[in-house]
Image: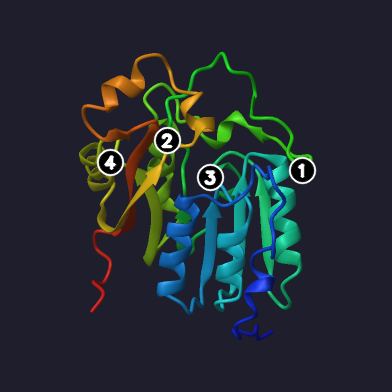
């Protein structure tokens, strides 16, 4: 069966007006990934978004001609929202798993992998959710931002499994906060015969929801390095990395 690659109106990709207090509202990190996906359109292969969240990146890939759409998220509410968004798109085969990273994807290969990993070393005395139920009645599990003690736990597990799921000439696009060691990330990629380059850098404000989860002293330590204040506001940079097999054919 052939699948259409025609572009649909953006109303099929994003809700016209997300409700106030929607904890699944796409972030600046998601927006940067969305930009990279749209710059590289059309897509014709099998694509995966790890941590699908609101589902907007997968929806954009669907309307850009991807052959098959696959998503994974550990939050049941994120899975529900992603499925609902994709089901509104005609003629796009898709599956969204509720699971932990590569666990539901044994033996599967993809032509594109997209991931905005949780990257904060959050406190573990703030409960299982962030914020309160919004107008849509949904709350977010702590997993959306919990990167473990150093912020790298999820990213490192993702990198460890990536080579076995990336097709030979495929690519991955991930976000990478400046307060995590890019040198360490590149080292981990290199020992797995992967290479990466920074394709975009964005400065963003750190939300109160994120700041409330940080362990004592972390912000002050990072303020001397990769996080900075302007008045009452806190900002950080993040990169979008493009990752490929080291032996992959270079793009001309």
Local crowd at mark 2 within 10 Å, few (<14), some, or many (≥20)?
many
How far is the residue under mark 3 from the one under mark 4?
19 Å
Q: Earlier in the sequence, mark 4 or mark 1?
A: 1
With 103 as the anchor, is 191 left or right in this view? left
Instruction: Choose between 24 and 163: the one closer to the eye.
Output: 24
Residue shown at the point (39%, 35%) measured from the top left: 233
Q: Position of residue 112 (x, y in %)?
A: 45, 64
Local crowd at mark 3 within 10 Å, few (<14), some, or many (≥20)?
some
Q: Is residue 233 above or below residue 247?
A: above
Q: Kindly state the secondary structure of the residue where label 3 is placed.
A: loop
Q: Is residue 165 visible?
A: yes
How far is the residue under mark 2 from the one under mark 3?
18 Å
Residue 185 badge: 4
Residue shown at the point (41%, 42%) measured from the top left: 205
With 187 as the anchor, is 111 left or right in this view? right
Q: Which residue is mark 1?
A: 135
Image quarter (top left, top right, bottom left or bottom right) of the N terminus: bottom right
Residue shown at the point (57%, 52%) measured from the top left: 26
Q: Earlier in the sequence, mark 4 or mark 2?
A: 2
How far is the residue under mark 4 from the one under mark 1?
38 Å
Residue 119 badge: 2
Residue 236 badge: none
Whether tag 2 and tag 3 are in contact, CB under 8 A, the answer is: no
- Foreground tag (4 vs 2): 2
Image quarter (top left, top right, bottom left or bottom right) of the C terminus: bottom left
- Foreground tag (3 vs 1): 1
Q: Is residue 113 visible?
A: no
Q: Earlier in the sequence, mark 3 or mark 4?
A: 3
Residue 102 badge: 3
Q: Which of the 4 image quarters holds residue 198?
A: bottom left
């Amino acid at each position: 069966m052939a699948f259409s690659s025609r572009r649909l109106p953006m109303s099929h990709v994003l809700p016209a007006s997300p409700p106030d207090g929607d904890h699944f509202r796409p972030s600046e990190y998601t927006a940067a990934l969305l930009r990279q996906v749209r710059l590289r359109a059309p897509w014709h292969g099998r694509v995966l978004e790890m941590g699908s969240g609101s589902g907007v990146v997968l929806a954009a890939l669907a309307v850009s001609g991807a052959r098959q759409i696959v998503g994974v998220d550990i939050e049941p509410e994120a899975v529900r929202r992603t499925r609902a968004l994709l089901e509104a798109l005609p003629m796009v085969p898709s599956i969204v798993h509720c699971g932990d990273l590569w666990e539901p994807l044994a033996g599967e290969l993809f032509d594109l992998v997209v991931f905005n990993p949780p990257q904060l070393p959050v406190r573990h005395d703030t409960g299982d959710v962030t914020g309160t139920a919004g107008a849509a009645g949904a709350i977010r599990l702590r997993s959306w931002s919990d990167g473990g003690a150093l912020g790298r736990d999820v990213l490192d597990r993702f990198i460890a499994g990536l080579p076995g799921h990336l097709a030979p000439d495929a690519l991955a696009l991930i976000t990478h906060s400046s307060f995590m060691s890019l040198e360490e990330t590149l080292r981990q990629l290199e020992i797995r015969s992967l290479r990466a380059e920074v394709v975009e850098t964005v400065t963003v404000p750190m939300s109160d929801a994120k700041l409330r989860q940080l362990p004592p002293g972390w912000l002050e330590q990072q303020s001397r390095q990769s996080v900075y204040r302007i008045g009452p506001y806190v900002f950080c940079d993040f990169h979008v990395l493009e990752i490929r097999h080291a032996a992959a054919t270079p793009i001309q």
